[in-house]
Amino acid sequence: LGGAAIRIKLSNLFGTTPVTFSGVQVAPSTGGAGIDAASSRVVQFGGQPTVTLAPGEERMSDAIAMPVKALSDVAVTMYFAQPTTVTTLHTLGRQTAYIGAGRQLAAAQLQGDKAGQRLSYYGLTAVEAASAAPTRVVVAFGDSITDGYNATVDAAKRYPNQLDDRLKAAGATRTAVVNAGISGNRWLRDVTGPNGYGRFERDVLAVPGVTHTIILLGINDLRSAY
């Protein structure tokens, strides 16, 4: 959704060692590895530009004074001063993450190579927009069908994305759709990600402003064990 400010959530929920984010900035994306450098903003956590997350910890940033339009692309750039293993990730991101050496937080074009590109989200679990307008939030909760398996990379064509597009086109401009799908997820067993029963409270009920949910989960429970 659009708003006058945003904030982001970083996570080390599944980490076994602390993770230090030595710097984080957000900016409007100009496509690919490019950003609108003049509009880039430093992200702070409790007034500090760096944050260390203990194993199992998640942290919401301070509000960032960067107005955004609905359905616009926001780039989140992270800097790690030391070699870092980030184990809290969304594997089936279907969105290219660009990795380059050095501190490039406000670079108009992140410098890297093809080998450094990934299709996963690392350590980033939410981007929220602030607005005083009444809002509805729909959480799509499920497995790979929701997550976007085989959806076109970098095209926002997962079914929750397309549902969001249709709602906006129909005039529901203050209704948001959150994708809480995990490819391979099950209701009762931790096979790919935490089981649906165990993560429902965090991934649905705890989403700020949630008013509705769509549940499409269970096909992996019917498959033979693997």
Image (cartoon, rainbow, N blue to C red):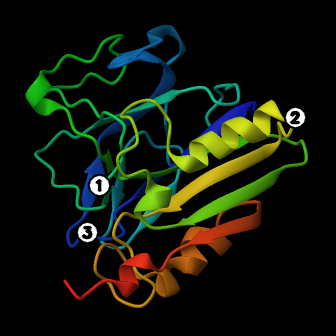
Which amino acid type corresponds to the residue marked 1 in the rendered image? Thr
First along the sequence among labels 3 and 1: 3
Q: Which residue is mark 1?
A: 91
| 182 over 48 or under it: above or below | below
Q: Which residue is mark 2?
A: 171
Query: Which residue does the numbered mark 3 point to in the structure image?
Result: 15
Quadrant position of residue 205: bottom right
Q: CA distance from mark 3 to mark 1?
A: 15 Å
Q: CA distance from mark 2 to mark 3?
A: 41 Å
Q: Nearer the viewer, mark 3 or mark 1?
A: 1
Q: Is residue 50 left or right of residue 46?
A: left
Residue for point 31% across, 83% down = 223
Residue for point 84% across, 49% down: 135
SS type, badge 3: loop
Image spot of residue 220 (x, y percent) = 37, 78
- Look at the numbered disc 2 and give the secondary structure of its residue: loop
What is the total number of numbered labels drawn onto the structure image?
A: 3
The crowding category of the residue bearing disc 3, from other C-alpha atoms within 10 Å (few below 14, some 14 to 19, many at least 20), is: some
Q: Which one is earlier in the sequence, the residue at label 2 or at label 3?
A: 3
Q: Which secondary structure lies at badge 1?
A: loop
